[in-house]
Structures are given as structure tokens and as C-alpha cells.
Image: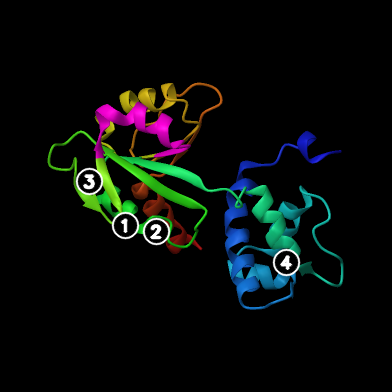
């Protein structure tokens, strides 16, 4: 059965960037091979889960040998398209949006925030790092000119759906949603919801119960 015929679980897909980051660290430390046990200890993910995740992509390692770090790195680069730069825009440059622009994926040079948008006159024209905040009126024009592929939403919840509608009409296929709203988008558009309150609540629950 080919990889295309296998439905890979979302949980596995979400772990792939973690694997890539860790393997890249090993490579930069001149490590040549790694076992699933070492991956497990480094990532705090049980080794059975790692082996199961890897099994969806065929034979990535050898029994008794482990995994060749260079091979794994090239595999994850190809799978995650880390040989291409993904251009990202932020809409909503309040405290959180400003922090994300300043961060600008400092651990990954294959993803870049290339534009930031807002509707507030106090934010438009402001320079954050190397990014100048643009007027949301120019969103569609700038997306078309620069080839932005992903949008991060850090706008008030009350306007989140309206903004998402504009984003999808501009042919953006990926939205990272930091608002508390659950967005309705067309088929083919992928939305990941990041609710910091829920994540913190979940962390506290596990701290108390495990």
C-alpha cells in the first residue's frame, strides 16, 4: 500500500515538526544515528508511538541499528517541504500579534512572517522588527503580490469570522487561529485552533491527575 493510500492520523502529522526539529539538532551536533529510545527520551514521547508514527512512511530505520540521522533529516525536510520557504502573514497586531512578529519563527528559517496587517491607525505604519504593519485594506493586493500562503489570526473574536472570510477568498489555504471563535471555512482550507486558555487548563488538569 502506498503512502498516498494510507490515511495518516492528525496526531501523527502534528508530531512531525517535533521530530524534524529534534533530528535537526542531532544532525547539527554531528550525531550519525539515533534509536527510538533516544528519540523517546529527547522528545518525551513514548517509543512505541514514535515507531508507529514512522511506520506510516515505510522503512525509515533498521532493527538493531536505529535511524540514520542524515536520512531522517532529509526525509522530514521533504515531507514537511522544509526546502521551501513558507510565507506567513499576521492579521491583528495587538500584544500577541506583536510578540509573534518579533518571534518570527526564529528556530526555523523555512517559515517567515513577511507581512502584518491591522485596521487601527495607531498600528498601521508601525515597524516591528523588519516588518511594517500594513493597512488591512491592502490585504488582497499584498497577498497576490508576495505569495503569502498562511495567515495567523490574532484579531478580536467578534471579527474573526469576517476576517477569515476575506482570507479564504484571497485563496489562503492555511489559518492558525488564536481567537476563541471556531471558524467556518470552505473545503480545502485548513484551520488550526490555538486557545491558550484551554491549553493552560489542560496542563493544569494533567499536573493534578498524572
Q: Nearer the viewer, mark 1 or mark 3?
A: 1
Residue 82 can be seen in this image: yes
Q: Quadrant of residue 74?
A: bottom right
Instruction: Please name the residue that numbered disc 2 is placed on.
Output: 204
From the image, tell me which residue sits under label 3.
94
| Residue at x 62% of width, y 53% of height | 16
Q: Which residue is mark 1?
A: 102
**Residue underneath mark 4:** 70
**Closer to the eye: label 4 or 2:** 4
Whole-percent x, y for residue 120 in the image: 16, 36
**What residue span does the magenta drawing correspond to?**
134-151
The crowding category of the residue bearing disc 1, from other C-alpha atoms within 10 Å (few below 14, some 14 to 19, many at least 20), is some
Q: Is residue 144 magenta?
A: yes
User: Closest to the observer: 32 or 141?
Assistant: 141
Label 4 residue SS:
helix
Q: Earlier in the sequence, mark 2 or mark 3?
A: 3
Q: Are marks 4 and 2 in contact (CB under 8 Å)?
A: no
Amino acid at each position: 500500500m502506498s503512502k498516498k493510500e494510507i490515511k495518516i492520523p492528525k496526531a501523527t502529522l502534528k508530531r512531525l515538526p517535533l521530530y524534524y526539529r529534534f533530528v535537526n539538532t542531532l544532525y547539527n551536533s554531528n550525531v550519525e544515528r539515533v534509536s527510538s529510545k533516544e528519540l523517546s527520551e529527547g522528545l518525551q514521547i513514548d517509543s512505541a508511538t514514535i515507531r508507529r508514527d514512522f511506520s506510516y512512511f515505510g522503512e525509515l530505520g533498521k532493527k538493531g541499528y536505529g535511524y540514520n540521522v542524515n536520512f531522517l533529516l532529509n526525509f522530514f525536510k521533504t515531507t514537511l517541504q522544509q526546502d521551501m520557504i513558507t510565507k506567513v502573514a499576521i492579521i491583528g497586531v495587538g500584544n500577541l500579534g506583536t510578540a509573534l512578529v518579533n518571534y518570527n519563527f526564529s528556530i526555523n528559517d523555512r517559515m517567515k512572517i513577511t507581512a502584518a496587517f491591522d485596521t487601527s491607525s495607531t498600528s498601521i505604519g508601525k515597524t516591528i522588527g523588519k516588518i511594517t504593519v500594513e493597512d488591512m485594506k491592502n490585504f488582497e493586493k499584498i497577498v497576490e503580490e508576495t505569495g503569502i500562503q498562511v495567515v495567523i489570526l490574532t484579531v478580536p473574536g467578534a471579527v474573526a469570522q469576517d476576517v477569515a472570510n476575506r482570507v479564504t477568498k484571497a485563496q489562503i489555504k492555511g489559518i492558525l487561529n488564536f481567537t476563541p471563535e471556531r471558524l467556518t471555512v470552505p473545503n480545502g482550507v485548513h484551520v488550526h485552533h490555538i486557545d491558550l486558555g484551554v491549553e493552560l487548563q489542560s496542563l493544569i488538569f494533567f499536573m493534578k491527575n498524572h
